[in-house]
Image (cartoon, helix red, strand yellow):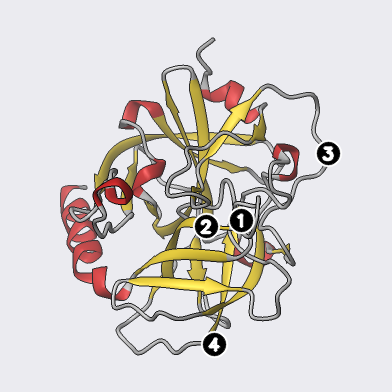
Amino acid sequence: MRSTFREVIRLNLGPGAPESNGRRRALTAALVLLAPAAPASAIVGVSEPAPELSPYVVMVLSRSGKTAGFCSASVLAQDIVLTAAHCLAEPSNTRVHFRDAQGQPVLVDVAAIVKHPGYRADAVQARQVSIDMAMIRLAEPLPARFKPMGLAELGAIKAGQDFRIAGFGVTREGAGASSGALRVGRISARLPLSSILLWTHDLEGRGTGACTGDSGGPILALDQPIVVAVADWAEGKGAQKCGALTQGALIAPQRAWIESVLAGWTHAR
């Protein structure tokens, strides 16, 4: 049965996102029907609730055929959000989701989607670099309580440098009922260093990192709401698919593209 977006809000989030290159896993969540869920959380390993980031991060829902899924996204303007390109369907099959002041789900239609020109859906198979990043223009603005995330500027990232990662994904791998609430964890840059990608891990070995549903969410500076990278896939140890390595597409090298899309959409309003 084809899922409607209202049904997606009532769904439990379960395993089933496409895998590639062994243990690497795209972080889009697949959805299955649920019984009433317990309080949800996100980010595997050590994490905590992130109410201070709730004005900056929303959820993106998409559907394709008989399946539907969700990702996380950063607010760049009242009607523009930034996420991972692999998260998105056509605009008519994509929605932005948040909860209102009473905790009720709100769905916002999508007016336009622009994927980064460097994004390649077949990057793993083709052994090509991919910039897994996309921008969404909403059909109507978010409420005034939402605020734009800052964008990182060019600067050297060092191995061991600490960041935060935020998202709505699962807190226990494979446990769909553990998703849906915004949480944040601490991760650190690791080698190899790249000019376009950021690889991170939990320096303390607690398995903290992005997992199913966190794709498109921000990897942030420690002390400010500034997005440094867009999370796009994770890797685990042994049979695990999350918790060992989290990759993100760096913002700074793509600022010209982001700002050009922002300017074009702003001019078109």
The residue labelled by disc 1 is: 242
Q: Earlier in the sequence, mark 4 or mark 1?
A: 4
x%, y% of residue 62? 45, 32
Lateral position of residue 111 relative to residue 186, left or right:
left
Lateral position of residue 196 relative to residue 203, left or right:
left
Residue type at mark 3: give it. Ala
x%, y% of residue 171? 71, 52
Q: Is residue 61 above or below residue 260?
A: above
The residue labelled by disc 4 is: 160
Q: Residues within 10 Å of mark 4 (few under 14, many from 20)?
A: some
Report if the CB atoms under discs 2 and 3 are less than 8 Å apart.
no
Q: Earlier in the sequence, mark 3 or mark 4?
A: 3
Lateral position of residue 62 relative to residue 223, left or right:
left
Report if the CB atoms under discs 2 and 1 are less than 8 Å apart.
yes
Residue type at mark 4: give it. Gly
Residue type at mark 2: give it. Ala
Q: Quadrant of residue 156?
A: bottom left
The residue labelled by disc 3 is: 38
Q: Residues within 10 Å of mark 1 (few under 14, many from 20)?
A: many
Task: Give the distance between the C-alpha atoms of the residues marked 4 and 1, in whole angstroms.
Answer: 19 Å
Q: Earlier in the sequence, mark 2 or mark 1?
A: 2
Report if the CB atoms under discs 3 and 1 are less than 8 Å apart.
no
x%, y% of residue 229? 41, 68
